[in-house]
Amino acid sequence: MSIPWDLALIPRRWTCGGCCAGRSGSGPPTGTCGFLSRSVSPLRPNAPCWRPTMPSACPWDSGSRGRGTIGPFMKRQSRRLDGGSRRKEEPARGSRRTGPPEEGEMGMRKIHYGWVICVTCTLLLFVTMGTVSNGFSIYLPYIMAERGLTHAQTSSLVTLRCLVAFVAMLLIGGYYRKVSLRVGTGLAVCCAGLAFWLYSAAETYPLFCVGAAVSGISYGLGSMIPVSILINRWFDQHRALALSICASGSGIATIVLPPVTTHLVERFSMSAAFRMGGAAILVCAGVVLLVLRNDPREKGLRPCGQTEIPPEAPATAVSPSQGALGRRTWILLGCASLFMGAVANPGFSHLSVLYTTEGFAPATVALMISGTGVMITVGKLLYGETTDRIGGRGSCLLFGGVLLAGHLLCCLAFVQSTALSVVNVLCLGLGYPIATMGPSVWSNDLAAPEQYPVVVRRLQVIYAGGALLFASLPGLLADRLGGYIPAYLLFSAIIALTLLCIALAYRSGGGDR
């Protein structure tokens, strides 16, 4: 049995916030309150069992901003009269239900489409950065063994890819002015699939070069630049979380692809593995084209977390001299970005060749690369949290020291120690995030807010230039000196010099903001 509570019996200071029949506000409210229509005891009709945190606020009214709580007396009496059961009343068709939500309704809110965009961007980076760069490194030993390429020729494939990607990044502004983000990123993924099909048909070095050039187009046009634009459009809140999820796409590829690639090559052939990879990439391109949307307005939505439409601010040009870094700081940050690009891309790309030439089994090498990918994904989260706690300078020096230790352990690969290999995987995985995320952190700490886009873009271009200049160095040193260990000795010295540049840049630039 349910006894309705008429609004006339409620003290004025506990009046419902508008979910009842007297919504217009003219005169005393009439009708039955949707919140207080549950069974209550008639012995204490005026007992203030409902204790709202704001007057005239009903917690069940979707349009109210107040928050209220039900007193224990009302809950207890409701259970007595209802016999412990709650009868569900279905609202009439087309009417608005004003009663409290059913059990579990709070957890059934529709997921904002921005999170679908986030997952799609993760898939995008899985292909354009993870598969094209990190996943391709697994094939390098097989390319040398089956196609007879030299160490220098194999390294030059990485160099060519970096060169084309560098040029594509310089032209990316005009590219996305011509085509939308959805179409442009879809074409970037298609280029990755085409590159893998070219690799599968390649028997000689020139055709491998063509495939590397096409993969560079995919890497350059499908990088973090369009992903950052999309996340900025689709998210008003949780932008950092969404970007970190997207950035994990390349790390997930590093985890998943090495064992899968090794299994496919050894079970079928290298050409068959390339063909199957290319087909899977083209399927991913279809998903990107079907799911991705350029702007929330295309779905009739606001950005995720936006509660009201912000006023349009007048566009103002920012002078290049406003908040500009000093010349010394620019030189130090430029050198640090150049050195990080020189270490991160060539260093990681040649890990599989380093351990294979030192006598490790291909399956073991694939497992090590996957483990490094797992730790890179973990390291990105730890690096961001550490930066928030101790600042950019401290986190860069800490994670840079770990990265230095990892490259020194690479120089001991000839020992063929399993324990050292495990420690090396941990150090490299935790240290590499400074290479990918460092320029953004340095720009945020040392540049004025209005200059942040300019500074971070320039540092990213310098970073790509470092990857390009040093991409062939490991192969050249291996041909002349008989192995890849000298290259990793050089990388260790470069990392130490990078840490010195970072420390001096923070000292001259004023430290953490």
Image: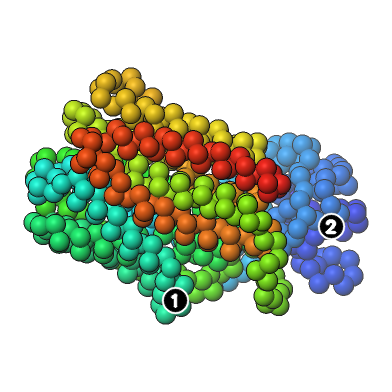
Q: Position of residue 403 (x, y in %)?
A: 45, 34
Residue 330 left/right relative to 476: right
Note whether 54 is above or below 289 in the view shown. Answer: above
Colouring method of the image: rainbow
Could one spot residue 332 in this view of the protein? yes
**Residue in the picture at 87% in, 43% down:** 47
Q: Position of residue 57 (x, y in %)?
A: 80, 56
Farthest residue in the front direction? 480
Q: Which marked residue is nearer to the observer: mark 1 or mark 2?
A: 1
Provide the secondary structure element on which disc 1 rests.
helix
Total numbered badges shown on the rendered structure: 2
The 10 Å Cα crowd at callout 1, few under 14, some 14 to 19, many 20 or more, is few
Query: Which of the 4 image quadrants contains residue 429?
Result: top left
Provide the secondary structure element on which disc 2 rests.
loop
* Residue toward you, 210 or 385: 210
- Per the image, the residue denoted by label 1 is 174
Residue 396 left/right relative to 206: right
* Residue toward you, 287 or 382: 382
- Precedes in sequence: disc 1 or disc 2: 2
Q: Position of residue 367 (x, y in %)?
A: 27, 33
Note whether 212 is above or below 102 in the view shown. Answer: below
Kind of residue at badge 2 = Ser
**Residue in the picture at 78% in, 63% down:** 18
Kind of residue at badge 1 = Gly
Residue 347 left/right relative to 23: left
- Per the image, the residue denoted by label 2 is 56
**Residue in the picture at 29% in, 55% down:** 159
Residue 118 left/right relative to 82: left
Query: Which of the 4 image quadrants contains residue 19?
Result: bottom right
**Residue in the picture at 43% in, 68% down:** 170
